[in-house]
Every structure is written in structure tokens, then in C-alpha cells.
Amino acid sequence: MKSENVLEVENLSVTFATERGPLQAVRDVSFTLHAGETLALVGESGSGKSVTSLAIMRLTPPAPLVALGGSVLFTGADGGKRDLVTLDPDAMRAVRGNEISMIFQEPMTSLNPVHRIGDQIAEAITFHEHISARAALDRAAGLLDKVGIPDARRRLSAYPHHLSGGMRQRVMIAMALACNPRVLIADEPTTALDVTVQAQILELMKELQQATGMAVIFVTHNLGVVAEIADRVMVMYSGAIVEKGGVVPLMTRPLMPYTQGLLHSVPRLDPEALGLSPLEAIPGSVPDPFRLPPGCTFAPRCRHREPACEAALPTLEAANGNHDVRCRRWRRLAEARA
Amino acid sequence: MTATAAIAAPVPESPLIEVRELRQWFPVGGGLLRRGDVVRAVDDVSFSIAKGEVLGLVGESGSGKSTLGRAILRMSTPTSGQILFEGRDVTKLGRRALRPLRPRMQFIFQDPFASLNPRMTVRQIVGAPLLIQRPELDGAARDARIGEVLRTVGLSLHYAGRYPHEFSGGQRQRIGIARALILEPAFLVADEPVSALDVSIQAQIVNLLIDIRKELGVAMLFISHDLAVVGHLCDRVAVMYLGRIVEIAPTRALFRRPRHPYTEALFSAVPVPDPTIRRERIILKGDIPSPLAPPSGCAFRGRCRYALPECASAVPPLRQVDGGHWTRCIRDDLKLGRSL
Amino acid sequence: MTTAAALAPLERDLATTGNRAWRRFRRHRLALFGIVAIVLMVLASIVGPWLIPFDQLKIDIRHRFAPPPWGGHLFGTDQLGRDLLVRLLMAGRISLAIGFLAMIVSTAFGTLVGITAGYYGGAIRIVLMRFVDAMLCFPSIFLLLILAAFIQPSVTTITLIIAATSWMEVARVVEAQVRSLRERDFILAAEMIGAPGRYVMFRELLPNAIGPIVVAATLTVARAVLMEAYVSFLGYGIQAPMASWGNMLNNAQQYLGSAPWLAIFPGLMITLSVASFNFVGDGLRDALDARFDVK
Ligand SMILES: Nc1ncnc2c1ncn2[C@@H]1O[C@H](COP(=O)(O)OP(=O)(O)O)[C@@H](O)[C@H]1O
Ligand SMILES: Nc1ncnc2c1ncn2[C@@H]1O[C@H](COP(=O)(O)OP(=O)(O)O)[C@@H](O)[C@H]1O
Ligand code: SF4
Ligand code: SF4
Ligand SMILES: [Mg+2]
Ligand SMILES: [Mg+2]
């Protein structure tokens, strides 16, 4: 069970046709998701996290607007493997919301404001399962209870705007869990929430994952949240994975200069760090996706850059065990640190 | 009673700004016949800020931080209370009377996209305060000053002809800061100036603000929901909950030992980017109550794990627990932790 | 300072945004057609009469009702033997001039009302916008005819009368735009530096309302041309012997059976110009939308 792969993503690439020309939002992304684990997808805004998630769900705009490449092999509950990139639309619809679910940053945009939340959850259930409306509503009440909404049965008839942001996110989670998915993709589910509510939602997601054994892809830009929830981490920069590994090695001994920079730029709470000590910022900003540097995309901001870095995009090398890094100098930098 | 205590609260030598029992209430939902409810966005807030001092203001969204920051700069007219700026009562001044004071107090906005006029160049945006407040300056003098302030924020006059959309979020925030600095204010209110930015850019802007306070000695009310950022930048920190300051203390004192259960919970909820630390977290139950119907007594009591029956009887007064450390909790037997 | 790091700006130039608006506009075939038609009409009206060897007022009794294209009269002649083409072009000068002038006056006035109402809000807004609503309720043609009946018709008075009944749309559009911009942070920033009202209105707000104003103004030209045709057709507008498309139509009524071209050509010109301005207005609306909408 432990080593089973529910999702094998290989060489996934997503290119948008835009008014300014083609924009490659996701470049050659490969990873596997094991059953029951939490894989965090980290990166700054615009690095391609959401597009990667949407592409797995095949929720990116249709063909002439977007070119999808690579494959996404999904192992269903029945043990059969399917490539979601080429799956026909009807079969894809059966997978979506059923075997793979998604929750978003802003629940208000994914909940329909004019329908009661009970009906919305029930509808999500009856869409995939042939049960009576009554039974579906019962299930919905059970789900709301499970995600910690007090007085669940009465809340069935509430409208989304009656609920606070945290409660709405709980409803979204309830809806996503309605059909016991094997994979849950959560795109910045706590970014819009206050820290105390974020703590509640993270706690809830951990509990639910333990109870259901689903695998989670957790998209976030908050490294604190990553440390809190992830088993493995994938760092994206300019559409490509630049580092990938277990949460402890990656966050305690990061190999890629970008990951190091990110970790250093997070302000710490410890009293020793307080008081006007400057943070170790990464200079500059992310490159324009239309004019990516030819070599390492991080090179313009990297203080370890050497001329060779700017010649060609480094490959994602296996550093040790399951720790991969996309930096041509990682070995020398690691030695220098040691 | 709470008021006098609070005024006595932080007494830096020469307060640049002093706020006394400030209230900003908003009527909502009223009709012709029906009297609507009132949102007590800011309720009975008192504090002062010394010259060159940076006071952090933290709290969750809806706690009234922005409303307070805007009221102090007289971007709104407070419902009651007093604001003294450089010793002068500015609470009731009209628009015209405020005009000569504007150069002394400026505002930095949260949203780097909404706060710059998309139809104006950087030169026009940053130069506008000079145009209005120093009409005697000629174009060359104005440009010189614009160049100077752009350099202060890490940009150059080279960019002055460009429009805001040509810049990234972090650079836009620098432009907004340059506009706030160009008149050499004595006091800045910065309303979550780094919240909309990515971590790596956020660090750049925090460093810039550290530089600015060191080199220009400008006093600041720094609003944020991020305790860690506040810890890096501020001399003192005030914690807001439902319109009131529930704790105010020098930064180190607050970080070492919070004295209000809400502050403790806030600290505990901040996720720490270190996967090797596993800690017992305090998970608060429920949400912030509606500001339309705050609980009687201590507004935090519904979520407080230390609540006693007495907590319901009256709004706890701010009481001093240490030099300059004040809390709005009636219990003094608590050993609150910083579960780090 | 230490943070004065090399910050490579996103190398995006303004031209791309301008280009994008133009590209969106170009997608509108009809709008492009409208632009071409308007340019041709304006040019023809300005220079045409000099190139054609007939005087618009020259009466030639021998060649009355000459059907087109008789003896060099490309569009035929009218009941006094005057060349119709040259009259049509001279009328174009008047009709289009009235259209453009009425547009300028009404846009300026409407903008002023809208921006004042939107900026000050409160009682000022209520009074001004109620007035706009009242004016809109009143059928403007009716208003136009009443005014025209009491006022000595001339190009100036007709222009002013049309403008007086056309500014409300602009006022509404501007008021709505200003009201939505009013609470934006950049306006608050202007207030924070102690900017006086007129600075905020004309330097900060107005440039952000240009898109909707341009669109409304274009549509106003179409409306004004139509209105002029309407009053002149009813005989209250431009008076003979000066020609406008409207009074040419009026004149043509009596000869509909015998000389239909007298009605057809001015009718076509009115339709063509009104349609063209409407097409351009629609195209501009789409093209400017994304660009001027402050995000
Ligand atoms: N529908 C779209 N059309 C064109 N470009 C898009 C679209 N959606 C996303 N992008 C671009 O793809 C890149 C990655 O975006 P996204 O995945 O949303 O980033 P993230 O979620 O990491 O913040 C960005 O440069 C973004 O502008
Ligand atoms: N103009 C207003 N009218 C009515 N309610 C308001 C207004 N401005 C703010 N509020 C309310 O006041 C409370 C405090 O808001 P705010 O100061 O923006 O909080 P914060 O900045 O801490 O997130 C909120 O409940 C908000 O809804
Ligand atoms: S490849 Fe070179 S530029 Fe890129 S991260 Fe490594 S050292 Fe830096
Ligand atoms: S006064 Fe009571 S309810 Fe309020 S924080 Fe203190 S212990 Fe908790
Ligand atoms: Mg995203
Ligand atoms: Mg705020």
C-alpha cells in the first residue's frame, strides 16, 4: 500500500497561446504521488503551481488556447491505469470530483452563491453516484459534521454568504471529500485565511487524510505550512521543478540556491532574530515568462552563478536518495558548506 | 477607568502621536424607519508613538487595524476620542486645515496594484506630493528630489518615465513608499505593505523599511497580520482583537512572554518553517465573533481556554503587568507559553 | 541604501498595451469599415466640392431633375437643376460639423456633470443625477422640437440644442466610472497629500475615465447626426438654401415618385454615417475595455 503510486506525472508541459505569443507555464514536470502521502508544491506566484494542478485535472482551457504535453498516469481504485492527458472527456468527468478532487484558494468563487450548501454537496454526490436526493442530503450532513461544522444538519440550508471564510473552506473540503477521492489537490486552501483559522484547517486536513488514506497535493507559497503538513516537497521556479525531496532533508539541507534563498528570506519568530536585523532577501524578481533566460532561470538572481549557468537549463539531477536538484553547482556548493 | 489606565500606558518621552479613547463606529444596514446596527470597528483605543519609534499593530482580518490606521491619519473622521499629532489636536480638523499637516504624515498602502494611478508615470506619481505641497519648486528641483527619493527606495530616475504596469509587485511597492517619503514625513502608517508580496520580495521590502527607519528616523505605525515580520521591524507591538487593543508591549517582552491568551494563540498558530519541530498547538475554536454583536465582557472569552465566569461581566481594563507591558485580561495567574 | 539592488524591470513597453487595444479593435471588421467610411466622408466633404465643377447653389433650370449620371452630374440634379453630389458634400460639411461640434459640447458638459457628481457624492450627486434622469425621461426629440420651434435656427443654435439633449449619457457613464474609482487606493493617496478637489478630479480621475468617455462620445456623434437630420427633415433645422442631409430629405419628399434619387442619396449618407459611428463606438468599447478598466 505504502509504495503504491496513485499518480505518475511525466514530462508534463503546458503552453498557453496568448496575445503576446506562446507562454510555457509548466516546463517538463515529472513526479509521482504515493498513496496516502502529502506532497507540497511550493513556489512564488506565477511559478506554475496552479497551472500544474489544473492540468492534472485537465481543467486548463481547451486545445487551441493551450497545448498539453506529457502524461499523467492515474491508478484508479479498481487498479486500472489511465493517462489523464489523453482520456476522453466523459471518462475524465467521471474521474474529476470523484476519484480526484480539488479545492481552491477562494471558496466563494467555487461555491454557487444562489444555492444552499446542502444542495450543492448533494448534487456533487448524485453526479457520480446513483442515490436518492434524500440519501445524498443525509450524506452531506454527515460530511459537514466530519469537517467540523457545528450543527451540520441545520447548516445544510445555509447559503455560502452566511458563512465565514473558514467555514466556507470547510464546506469546500466536505464537497471534495463527498466521493472518497484517492487524490485531493488543494490549491492554496489556507492562503486567504487568518493564521488561527489556517491552523484549524490544516489540523482538519491532517485528520481527514489519516482517516481516509487519500493522497494530497498541497499547493502553497508558505514554507511554514509546508513544514507543518508535507511528507515530500517540490519547489517550482518559472514553470520547472528546481528541487524535490523529503520535507526534512529539503528544508533543513536545501541544495538549490533558490530554495536556500526562500528559506532564508522567511522572517523567524525567535526572539534572537528580532530587532532590525535585515532579512536575507533574494535580489531581483522572477523573470518575465515571455523572456526566460536561456540557461538556469534563477541565474539572474543567483549569487553562485557562473558563466556556464547561463548557457543551458541544468537538468534535474538525483542528488541523494529521493532528493533531486536542478543546479549545475549543487555538489560544489554542498561541499563548500560542509 | 480603562481610558485613564490606557493613556498612562505607554509613555514614551515626547510622543509624536497620541491617541486617546479613539472610537470609529460605522452604522450599517439602517433604513429610513429602522435604526441599523453599528460596527464598532475601533473601540476605545489609546496609545502613543514617540519620535522615530515603530509600533507594530497585529491582529486578524476584521479586527480594525486598517480603520485605526486611517483614522489616525484623518482619512476618516473618528466617532469620538482624540488624536494629538505633534501636540496638536487634529481630531476635528477639516480638509483644508489638514492640508499643511499632510507632508508630516503619510500612508503606505497594502495593494501595490490599486494604490498607483495606472494613467500616471512614476515621475508624476512620486512627484505629485511636491507639485501640491511645494508648488514653488521648479521642474529641475522637483526632478532632483524625485531622483533622490527613488534612489532611497532602490529605484532610479531612469524608470521615472514608465507606467506602473511595467513594474513587478515589489517595485510598485517601492514606488508607493517613495511617494510617501518624498515630503520627508515624521510619521508613516504602513498598512500591510508586504502582505501582498511573495516571500523573497517581502524580505526586500522589510529590509527597505528597516533601512528607512534607521536612516530617516521616521516614526511608523506598522500594520501586519504577520507576527514574524512585526518582530523584525518594530520597537513595540500592539495586538488588536475585535476593535480593541488587548495587549501592548515592547517587542521582546511580548515575544518572550505574551500576557494575553489571544496573543499566545496567535503565536501558536503561526506555522514555523522547520519540519523537525513538532509542537503542541493551541487550536482556537470557532471564528472571530461578528463585530456587530461582540460578546459581553471579554470579547475573546468564547474562544479562550482560560475563561472564567467573571470574564463575562465587564470588558477587562488594560492593566500593566510589567514596565510598558499592558494586557486586557483579568487573569494574572496565567503562565502563557511561546510554544516554539 | 543596501536594498538598492539591481532590479531588472519587467521589460514591457507601453507599445504592447497600445498594440493590444489596436489588435482587439482590428478584429472588429465593422468598426474598421466604419473608420474608413468616416474618414472618406469627412475628406470628401472637405475637399470634394472644390474638385467638382459645379456650384452647389448654381441654378440650372434647363437641367432640372436630371437623373444620375446625366451629363457629368454623377448623382443627378434637383428640382432647380443643382448638382446633387456637390450639394450632398456641402450638406455633409454641415451635418458632420454639427455632429462633431455637438459631440464636443455635450461630452465636455456631460463629463463635467458626471465627474462632479461622482467625486463629491452625497447631496450634490443626488441633485445632479436626478436632473440627468429627468432629462433622460423626457423624450429628447420632443425637447429638441420645442427648443427648435422657439429659437432662430442656425448651425450654432442647432448644435447647442442637440448638445443640450445629448450630454446625459456621457454624464451617467462618467459618474459611474468615477464612483467606482473614488474609493480606490490611488485616489485616497491623492487625498493624503492634501490634493485639492480639482486636482483629484481632473488629474487623477479623468484620465481613468477616458475610455468610456471616448466610446460614449463616438456614439454621441451618431446620435447628433441623426438628430440634426430629424429636425431639419421636419423643417425646424438648417434652413434652405444651406443644405444639410436632413433638409435635403425634406425637400425630396415632394418628388419621391418622379425623382427618387433626391431622397435616396441623402438617406444613404445619413444611414452610412450613423452606422459608421455606431460601429466604431462598439469597436472602441471592446478594444478599450481591458485597457482602461483599472484592475
Ligand atoms: N489562462 C491563462 N492564460 C495565459 N497564461 C496563464 C493562464 N493561467 C496562468 N497563466 C500563466 O501561467 C504562469 C503560471 O501561473 P500559475 O500556475 O497560476 O502560477 P502560481 O499558481 O504558481 O501562482 C503565469 O505566468 C501565468 O501568467
Ligand atoms: N466603511 C465601513 N463601513 C462599515 N463597516 C466597515 C467599514 N470599514 C471597515 N468596516 C468594518 O470594520 C471592521 C474592521 O475592519 P478593518 O479595519 O478593515 O480590519 P482589518 O484591517 O484589521 O482587517 C470590519 O468588520 C469591517 O467590516
Ligand atoms: S545553476 Fe548556477 S545560476 Fe542556477 S542555481 Fe545553480 S549556481 Fe545558481
Ligand atoms: S479575560 Fe478571561 S476570557 Fe478574556 S482573555 Fe482573559 S481569561 Fe480569557
Ligand atoms: Mg496559484
Ligand atoms: Mg486591513
Image: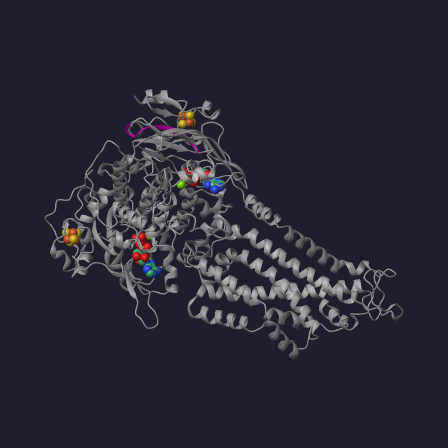
Pick the residue in front: A139 or A143: A139
Q: Classify the position of the C terminus of chain A by image quarter.
A: top left
Horizontal relation, residue A133 to residue A295: left or right: left
- The residue range painted magenta reads A238-248
Q: How many marks?
A: 0
Q: Relative to the observer, which residue lies in front, C275 or B39?
A: C275
Residue B221 visible, this angle:
no
**B131 in the magenta segment:** no
Q: Is residue B93 above or below residue B328?
A: below
User: Whole-percent x and y of residue B153?
Assistant: 40, 43
Image coords of residue C254 (percent x, y): 78, 73
Q: Main secondary structure of the magenta part?
A: strand
Whether the magenta-drawn stretch holds residue A246 is answered as yes
Image position of C263 (left or right of A186): right
State which quarter of the image contains the N terminus of chain A: top left
Q: Quadrant of ligand 5?
A: top left
A267 above or below B190?
above
Q: Position of residue B327 (x, y in %)?
A: 17, 52
- Describe residue B238's horizontal placement relative to residue A127 as left or right: left
Against B97, is B154 above or below?
above
Q: Residue at x 21, y 45 (%)?
A: B265
